[in-house]
Amino acid sequence: MPQKNNSSPPFSHALHNYNACNALREIGEYDDWVVTTAFYSGMKFLEDKLFPGDYMHPIKTGENKEYKTFTSYVRDMGRILGTNKHKVMSGLVSKHIDNNEVVNSYEDLKQSCHTARYINYQVGSDRVQMAIDAIESIKNYCV
């Protein structure tokens, strides 16, 4: 994928979340939010990496369409699949990111974030370290 100038709104949002993740980690009391901000940072870094881009049109089989933003892609895909943006991003990452470590890091972050937000906010140090390692892997790949 072509190198970008890194001033897009998704990239700025990714850096904001990345900095929040690191600040929360230093505080040491909000590990669930360390994992959550790591996930959303990764999602935004990957959004910046993947868009704009040409992807298969969800209705017109065999036809590509240029999508300038992830939001426009989700809008079209959601009409067909009735799915949410996290599932859509997972599909894009697994199909269009050619680095298995990044793909696995994204999926680990997604699952850990879901657990921390909806099931158990008490996150162990192993999950925090996994989140930090994962976001560093994603950031290094995207930047």
Image (cartoon, rainbow, N blue to C red):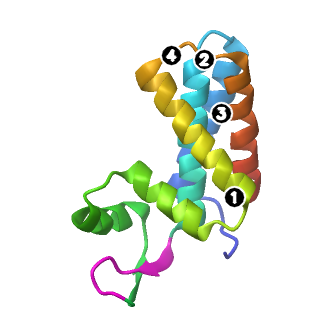
* Residue under label 3: 19
Horizontal placement of 97 versus 61: left or right? right
Which quadrant would the N terminus be assigned to in this image?
Answer: bottom right
At label 2, the amino acid type is Val
- Does the rendering let one see residue 16? no
At label 1, the amino acid type is Cys
Mark 1 and mark 2 in contact (Cβ < 8 Å)? no
Badge 1 density bin: few <14, some 14–19, many ≥20, Cα 10 Å: many
Measure the C-alpha gap from mark 2 to mark 3. 19 Å
- Nearer the camera: disc 1 or disc 3: 1
- Nearer the camera: disc 2 or disc 1: 2
* Residue under label 2: 123
At label 4, the amino acid type is Tyr
Where in the figure is residue 24, as x and y percent of width and height?
A: 63, 20
Mark closer to the chain start, 4 or 3: 3
- Nearer the camera: disc 2 or disc 3: 2
Q: Secondary structure at mark 2?
A: loop
Mark closer to the chain start, 1 or 3: 3
Judge by depth and name the residue closer to the eye, 68 or 111.
111
* Residue under label 1: 142
Mark 1 and mark 4 in contact (Cβ < 8 Å)? no
* Residue under label 4: 121
